[in-house]
Image (cartoon, rainbow, N blue to C red):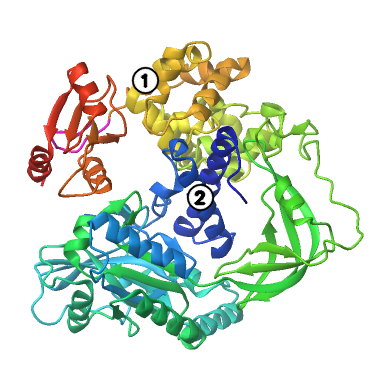
Amino acid sequence: MGIDITDAEAANELMRLAKQIAHHNRLYHAEDTPEISDADYDVLVRRNAELEAAFPHLIRADSPSRLVGHEVAASPLSKVAHEVRMMSLDNAFSDEEVEEFVARVRRYLNLPADAEVAMTAEDKIDGLSCSLRYEQGQLVRAATRGDGQVGEDVTANVRHIADIPQRLEGEVPDLFEVRGEVYMGKADFAALNQRQEETGGKIFANPRNAAAGSLRQKDASVTASRPLRFLAHGWGAASQVPEITQFAMMERMRRWGVPVSPLLRRCTSMAEMVQHYRHIERARADLPYDIDGVVYKVDRLDWQERLGFIAKAPRWGLAHKFPAERAETTLEAIDIQVGRTGKLTPVGRLTPVTVGGVVVSNVTLHNRDEIGRLGLRLEDRVVIQRAGDVIPQVVENLTRDLPRPAFTFPDHCPECGSEAVAEEGEVDVRCQGGLICPAQRTERLKHFVSRAALDVEGLGEKTIDQFFALGWLESPADIYRLRARRSAILEREGWKDKSVDNLLTAIEAKRAPDAARLLFGLGIRHVGAVTARDLLKRFETLPRLREVAEAARCSEDARAELTSIEGIGPAVVEALGDFFHEHHNAEVWDDLLSEVSPPPYAVETKDSAVAGKTVVFTGALETMSRDEAKAQAERLGARAAGSVSAKTDLVVVGPGAGSKLKKAQELGIEVIDEAAWAEIVKAAG
């Protein structure tokens, strides 16, 4: 796909990608049930990155480039907040992209062209990220990554993994968090599945899923019965880091008794990095565990500190992914599924084929345009590829030139018969039935009570389907009226006094819900969880947000007020205006707010002199690059803007500052030099 598209088309595609990727992140990280392959997922992430690079002004607040993993799902395991956030890594798929990564490091650090940039290189284990907290050398807690900020406590389970030392050897810091991957070896995985099949247990799709399912057990004895392993790749919180390089620190961890990859190397040139990548790639099939690439990290820790992080990943690390595995099969059928937003998604049914040891039979075809791009018809022979999970992507149609009837994408919803069309500038075909479409009405209700939205415990998908079929649930407000149906619910099979009372209590507990969660739960197009929070940060209450959103349809001032919020672009403004302009949506909104009373939205800001302020950097900065300065501002809770306006709070100037400095002076905005900015950073710690 090219980038020769309009702003509106790019905004729509970025919106779709954000939702698709968030969906797959939830399945992979929170539920251990991925439905697409790593390669398919990488294609989505890569397309998102390409669009954001071409249209930086359209980057969404809920962009996948800003998020790590997924919020911890409901689980019998308790939640654990990470003292230091667990990040993910950006990906590269070619030697040229790795070369550009090294060049970016040089540019960011203002290094001369001949300066050595040493990197560590090691195999990327396809496992479950885990953080091990040692105090006085003793293992005291283990946690999964979760969404990077909050994970699950798996301490009792981890104590049964033989690779993980209960106590570190030698002199160690008072506090040290070892971070790495819990995995299952190939042979152990095959033996486990054989046992599962013999006993009628769950068959795991691949070693990564088996490892995740084995570690995230309420009963630690289940984990103890599974052959889990561990390899460290770094660290988190530490009272002391006794080495000055990544490689030396990993070697020290090895001496402490922590398992570290035997393939870890220190490379001093691009040629050495690529050479080691090729070596690991050749050895891949013979390794006792699954890997999906090679990870590079800047060796010097002081440089890592300067480089810092951007959104969800460090600037000093990169994952060089392996090419996807491929196979041929036949496209037997194309089914159309209707989502909660009315989107018609085509799903290809394949003649089952084994790719990399996994049998696959389904593939998402994304949308009508993708079917047209590949020229897909029933009975076509197709090439599919995968890189470690279940559902692959179609990369080539081998029989597109054969005479065969074209596939006709439906122009009416298969669920309700309403007209299905693609709006101007969009590729997705959507059912126009809205609230009369069963697929949308029930899915919207399920979304409303989901974990990321209202999180109503006990009101699951089956219950919503049941109550909807009975006519008890038509809109979100009906959820709060279920108390009047207590007797009727008790008459239904499977319901007892305790279960009904638990459900009604859970609903009543959401009478004063978080305003941002409620807004997200309404399923307004383009308004994801992060966007909802950004909107409420500015407007605090839902009535105030509605007032501005409605005014934005005819008031430039109101539109400007909305788009001045970081991450809020024209697509969000239009979606909000359209939502409230529709009479039935306004009725749903008013009806819901007659049942609930969300308190004003409050946000905690980081304790620094510039938290919550808008900062602009201008001129030639001498001690850091512009990107590094902006990253510092964001870490201090400030917003780094590119231009000076009446909303700017502080301007940091270097030599050669021109028009921005002049405008700041004209507006009476505080102006400081680079040294003063350094003091602010230092004071924040």
Which amino acid, mark 2?
Glu
639 inside magenta stretch: no
Which residue sits at x=17%, y=18%? 668
Which amino acid, mark 1?
Thr
Magenta stretch, residue numbers: 603-612
- Tell me the CA gap for discs 2 and 1: 35 Å
Vertical position of residue 150 compared to residue 137: above or below: above
Q: Please name the residue that numbered disc 2 is placed on.
A: 50
Q: Position of residue 386 (x, y in %)?
A: 60, 68
Dot 1 lies on which element? loop
Residue 357 appears in the figure: yes
Q: Please name the residue that numbered disc 1 is placed on.
A: 541
Vertical position of residue 652 compared to residue 155: above or below: above
Which residue sits at x=85%, y=63%? 379
Vertical position of residue 122 compared to residue 55: above or below: below
Dot 2 lies on which element? helix
